[in-house]
Image (cartoon, rainbow, N blue to C red):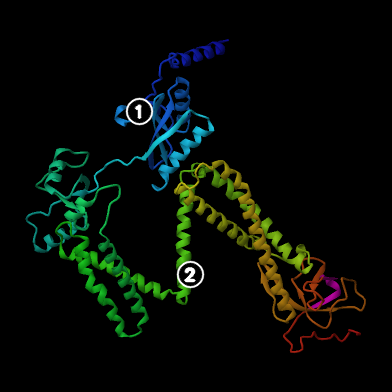
Amino acid sequence: MVSLVNLMRSRGTRGAHTSAPPAEGSSPTAPSMEEETAGTVPLPYFNRRIKLLVEVLDQPDEIVLATQLLRERGWAVRQATPADSPSARSGFTALIVEVRLRGARLGACRHARSQVRSLIEQRKLAAWVRDASIVEPDLPRVSTTYHVHRRTPPGAGGLKRWVLKHWEASGGADIQRALVLPGPSDSQKARAEFAQRTLGGPPFDAEIHDVRLGAAPKEEAADVAGRTGGLQTRNSREVATFLGLVVVLLGSGIAIHATESPWALFGLIPAAGLCWRLGAWATSNEPRPVLFRLAIGILFTGALTWLGYLLARSALGPVPILVLVAALTGLGIGLAFGVWHALSHSWISRNISWLLPALIPPLAFVLPIAGRFLHTYYLREKFGIPADTVPIAFYSQYFVAMKPMAIASAIVFIFLGIIGWVRHFHWGGGARELTLMMWPFVLLVYLLTAVQVSLGDTSDAAERTAARARAGDAPGSYYGIVGSLVCVQPLGKDIPVLNGPLPRNHPVLSFGSTGDYLWVWDPKRDGRIGQAVRVRSEDVAVLTFTDRSDRRCPRRATDGS
């Protein structure tokens, strides 16, 4: 009874806070974006904001329904104000909808417009998208970062002062306080603002503290004035010069490795000649010690020259091979970024804490099963020998299953990489249902591909073993299955033989035995793969085949034939 009263009381409380429906004939007022998001769950990750002007039929039911459906998608909705210049048609009211997306800037506006249009078409709303634009706040394009550091004591001697000045330039004397101001550098303005407040560290004292800029190239007035719009521009001549220097320094390292004489030292001339100019340019935003600038230049030129030397030293072969390796490396890096785009801020990344521990333990059982299957296919289907009669180490079942697992993982890696880039550039559009429907088929294809490649590899290994056995060479091994050529000689005249007769004059292929029976394969039988011969181990003598010129087994004196 008490629980029933509490239930009725809670329903009454919720009903008291429920807003009443708008009066008939009046236009409902949509709450602001701040009111709409207050008290809700945290917003999902996004890095793009697109505002859309949506016109809805000026009827209370249509406006309420459209607002409710748009907010269910996690989009902010409010009524347009005169500042938005809605220009709505007669009989329509304008709503401002903000769609939050994750991905590249290119295609974001189109994708947001497509999502809203798809919702309107699916729910049969009396609305349409009139305008759409990506939101890019007009922030300062040029800013300067200032760091507070301790001044060098005025009474410091020559050597001590020289060391402390270099220590200041490297940031060693900083007190870990930084200020970012819009516009070009203005140290006096920065000192004044540092003195205004203390956020937690020591207060700024002009007698013992000073400010410095982080090492960077000097901003030219033309560059500062030309940085307008959404993207920062760079002088194309500077970019081309920088890329040319990279090529020259890498080539110097390659030339040093290719020249096997004292003349190789001349390859250091480009690095030695450019270190000062690059160091001075990279630290030209304020005066700095000469040694500090030179060290920055040596670090840059020396690293690129050394990289060129290492590339030449670790060359894998001719130039076409190097180009292929570089292309595959670039493709792998691109796919890795695609996988990151596909998995980050997704259902998998949000549940990885329990998903990964749940997937790893089954591998301990799945891999041996797959390995046992491949071993059985190799022996039974190709040589007619039961797998349980051959000695195979348990851990070999893991090794043989690693290749199909690697193939399957590579297919998933490529697939996720492509999906990630499709998601990043918003190429999926409104095909979410189609994507979900195609997932089972894609997984089935990738599993069948991994199985087909694995069986083909196993079949090729069996063919190679059979060919080497026919040629009288050592067969080799296949993931724990070790084959050898042996001579089988009966210990009596009449012994039981399955799939006989028992070859006596030439070697046969054996993979060992774990029981009372010995299974061998005769390379000279007709056909690529024949039936294996089985004899009791106690009825025969097994001799290791020696490489005889006539490829024949020795005859036993007791053999009557």
Residue occupying image coordinates x 85% and y 85%: 556
Q: Residue 341: tell me if it is visible.
A: yes
Residue 310 x, y percent position in the rendering:
38, 72
Closer to the camera, 522 or 516? 522
Q: Earlier in the sequence, mark 2 or mark 1?
A: 1
Extreme-left residue of the structure: 155
Does dot 1 land on a helix, a strand or a loop? Answer: loop
Residue that carries the numbered disc 1 in the rendered image: 80
Residue occupying image coordinates x 86% and y 74%: 539
Disc number at residue 324? 2
Residue 406 x, y percent position in the rendering:
58, 59
Q: Residue 390: tell me if it is visible.
A: no
Left/right placement of residue 53 relative to residue 507 reads left
Residue 142 x, y percent position in the rendering:
22, 48
Q: In which quarter of the image is residue 495?
A: bottom right
Closer to the camera, 170 or 467? 467
Disc number at residue 313? none
Q: Is-magenta flag for residue 539?
A: yes
Range covered by the magenta-colored residues: 531-542
Q: Quadrant of residue 326?
A: bottom left
Does dot 2 land on a helix, a strand or a loop? Answer: helix
Q: Is residue 112 above or below residue 275?
A: above
Residue 11 x, y percent position in the rendering:
51, 15
- Closer to viewer: mark 2 or mark 1: 1
